[in-house]
Amino acid sequence: MIQKHPGLTNLSAFKALTAHRERIASLNLRDAFEQDPERAVSMTRSAAGIIYDFSRHLVTEETIGLLMTLAAQTDMRARIAAMFSGERINTTEDRAALHVALRAPEGSCITVDGVNVVPGVHEVLQRMRAFSQAVRDGSFKGHTGLEIRNIVNIGIGGSDLGPVMAYEALRHYSRRDMTFRFVSNVDSSDFFEAVRDLDPARTLFIVSSKTFTTLETMTNARTAREWLVGALGDEAAVARHFVAVSTNGAAVKAFGIDTANVFGFWDWVGGRYSMDSAIGLSTMLAIGPEAFMDMLQGFRRMDEHFRTTPLDGNLPVLMGMLAVWYATFMGAPTYAVLPYDQYLKRFPAYLQQLIMESNGKSVTRDGLPIDFDTSAIWWGEPGTNGQHSFYQLLHQGTRLVPVDFIGFANSLNPCGRHHDILMANMFAQAAALAFGRSADEVRASGTPEHLVPHRTFPGNRPSGTLLMERLDPASLGSLIALYEHSVYVQGIVWNINPFDQWGVELGKVLAERIVGDLESTRDPVLSHDQATNQAIRRYRAMKNH
């Protein structure tokens, strides 16, 4: 039975951590490593093929112990169990949050309202598998009898960010005789740039919208329909060139999509947690069913680790609690994720939605205002590009920015010294951030005195390192699940609901009101705020001039 959250600031561990933060304000990472020759070993954990070194974070063993106590006092183990058992932990929408069921092994039992959902998950997976195989081997053909060789995924939010990230991350394993494009922005340029060099007779659109009413997605889908029918000259072509990931069968059928090619998912899966569901159809088409199942196995390995491992050895718990430490106790406004692998170039953008849409909340589960900081702003770019961009701020700026470095021991495209240089940079950046370069060291190198302040690195900039053997479908699955679960850990501690996203609704509602005023053939009677009214008038005056 989950206990009622007593309020974070009332917990003894919260008060202890607040006092502890003051005591270790002068913590110096150089000294910490000198005083503890085993620090790098004792502050490293591993699971599901991921080695996590958090020794360069601004923590001591006491800090970690207090964070684990805080986790225990927020009933962490019971809340983890509640998620895996299908309880309605998404309280504001009265739903389970059961993305772990999407990768549960066949034959297992996870229930929602007394119904085992695993057989339904595997039925959809089998249908995805059969369809993907038919497209990839050419037995599923377009309206004119040509094989499909272009896939365009139309979605937004979780229906886009996950598929884009997964395709880019696993591009090495993708079919190189097939083209994959992704359309999300309602800006028409996004669509037309995506299809400008594609043959409509060889193009398949995947329209991903749970309700089949999402404004941006359906606007792009209708434009795609017009583009296809205009080129092929037959409305019947829609059935051979469109599939849907949706639960609205009637709307899908009305669009002209063959209901045999509709892949469903469930209200207990949030969009940003759905990339391993039917939302991942483009991923399966790209890498093949077997590799997709390998990815699910990676998810599953981290799920089991999260569900069964004691708190102090649990990677998602450790990462989640460190994020809490920096956001709530250390006042860090942002957190950077820096993957040293070009294939992970879209991973930070994916994490932005996963983390900030989940934990960007200012009220508790009970609707009470929060009087402490919750989620940081998450961001990042691949190394080594970022080193020649924003690392200046990380090293010598005035802001505390914790960092996750992500790297792999083996390159998927080995070439001479490239990978060794890449990883040397990752290791060097972590060391430079932590230990810096003192003024005396700068002077000793022969630097003129007037340049010493400019070439001094204060150090004490925190980071953790995630190291894996290579980027493959299984390791990607483990990595994503690691961050998914760390998000939930943070939500548990802050007593917020990481599975709703009411903050995205207001702007959408207002946009629906405004678009009519923009499209009106007559001067509309405007009833918005004065700034919006003025913007509408200016836009209408400038439009088509």
Image: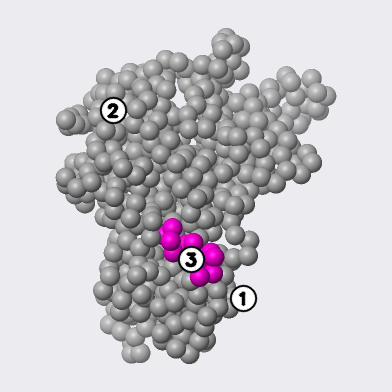
Tell me the distance, in whole angstroms, between the alpha carbons under discs 1 and 2.
Answer: 52 Å
Locate residue 364: give its quadrant. top left
Mark identifier at residue 251 = none
Residue 71 visible? yes
Residue 41 percent across, percent down from the top left: 55, 17
Q: How is the image coloured?
A: one colour
Residue 154 percent across, percent down from the top left: 45, 67
Q: Residue at left 24%, top 38%?
A: 85
Among the two numbered marks 3 and 1 on one chain, the one whose residue lies closer to the N terminus = 3
Report the front residue among 351 and 540. 351
Residue 268 percent across, percent down from the top left: 27, 51
Residue 496 percent across, percent down from the top left: 27, 40
Q: Seen in the image, is 118 located left or right of residue 366? A: right
Q: In front of the other: label 2 or label 3?
A: 3
Q: Which residue is mark 3?
A: 134
Report the front residue among 231 and 368. 231
Residue range in magenta is 128-139
Amino acid carrying mark 3 in the image:
Ala
Q: Residue at left 29%, top 29%?
A: 76
As drawn, 316 above or below 112:
above
Residues packed near mark 1 inside 10 Å, few (<14), some (14 to 19) or many (20 plus): few
Q: In front of the other: label 3 or label 1?
A: 3
> Magenta segment: does it hold 137?
yes
Mark identifier at residue 197 = 1
Report the front residue among 515 and 491. 491
Residue 397 visible? no
Mark identifier at residue 77 = 2
Q: Residue at left 34%, top 27%?
A: 308
Q: Main secondary structure of the magenta part?
A: helix
Amino acid carrying mark 1 in the image:
Asp
Tell me the distance, in whole angstroms, between the alpha carbons under discs 3 and 1.
Answer: 24 Å
What is the secondary structure assignment of the residue under circle 2?
helix
